[in-house]
Image (cartoon, helix red, strand yellow):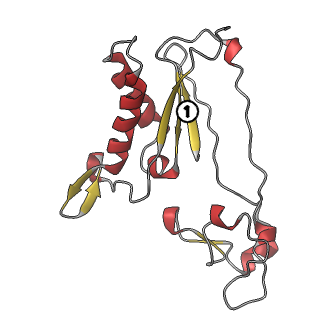
Amino acid sequence: MHRAINHEIKTHYCLLFPHRAYKTIEDEDLRFPLVYGEGKKARVMATIGVTRGLGDHDLKVHDSNIYIKPFLSCCPEVTVYNLNQYEHSADDVLVMGTDGLWDVLSNKEVNESVSTFLANCDPDDLNRYTMAAQDLVMRARGVLKDRGWRITNERLGSGDDISCYIIPLMYGNRQP
């Protein structure tokens, strides 16, 4: 998953877990551009998508003997959220989504969408989490128009696959 937001209505805070590999660029790295392009078209050394190259130890830059592996890290960034630290209501959720969601919707847009959706649902309806996730997927995809998929403000919708999970946190600190 690319990013997660912990939506908590009372205190409004976010936990972000980016799933992108980065390297601190040194001056000597700048001789040959490390990353070409932006967004979905970004490529490490004009060869492969950043996260696609994590396991390919023998991958070389096209038409060269430069190995790509030293420019990638397979060490994830991990943050632990203690569910027992807070009391969670039915509207406190963790939103996990792939880059198809996060490339087109901001944290704020997702937070507002989920807050509004859950506020308009019966708190006892467990299907509301699935429906809120489906709503986010539809927002990220957008509407098909003559110029392609569009979301709000005529921005491009996601052309990538979109997966989204909305996980209620209120069950995390209940004892069996």
Q: Is residue 174 above or below residue 94?
A: above
Residue occupying image coordinates x 28% and y 45%: 152
Q: Could you say where residue 115 lies in the image, as x and y percent from the top left?
A: 40, 23
Q: Could you say where residue 103 lies in the image, as x and y percent from the top left?
A: 47, 52
**Which image quadrant is residue 79 in?**
top right
Left-right relation of 84 to 119: right
The residue positioned farthest toward the left in the image shown: 146
**Which image quadrant is residue 42 in?**
bottom right
Residue indicated by mark 1: 5
Residue occupying image coordinates x 18% and y 63%: 146
Secondary structure, mark 1, is strand
Left-right relation of 122 to 15: left
One can see residue 59 in this view: yes
Q: Is residue 160 above or below residue 92?
A: below
Question: In this orientation, which residue lies closer to the viewer: 64 or 37?
Answer: 64
Question: In this orientation, which residue lies closer to the viewer: 128 or 40?
Answer: 128
Estimate how packed mark 1 is, as few (under 14), some (14 to 19) or many (20 or more) residues with alpha carbons within 10 Å: many
Q: Could you say where residue 131 lies in the image, as x and y percent from the top left?
A: 36, 30
Count of numbered badges drawn on the protein = 1
Residue occupying image coordinates x 41% and y 28%: 114
Residue occupying image coordinates x 30% and y 18%: 120
Type of the residue with mark 1: Ile
One can see residue 115 in this view: no
Q: Could you say where residue 48 lies in the image, as x and y percent from the top left?
A: 62, 73
Q: Is residue 50 above or below residue 131?
A: below
Left-right relation of 61 to 112: right
Question: In this orientation, which residue lies closer to the viewer: 63 or 172?
Answer: 172
Q: Quadrant of the C terminus?
A: top right
The residue positioned farthest toward the front in the image shown: 176
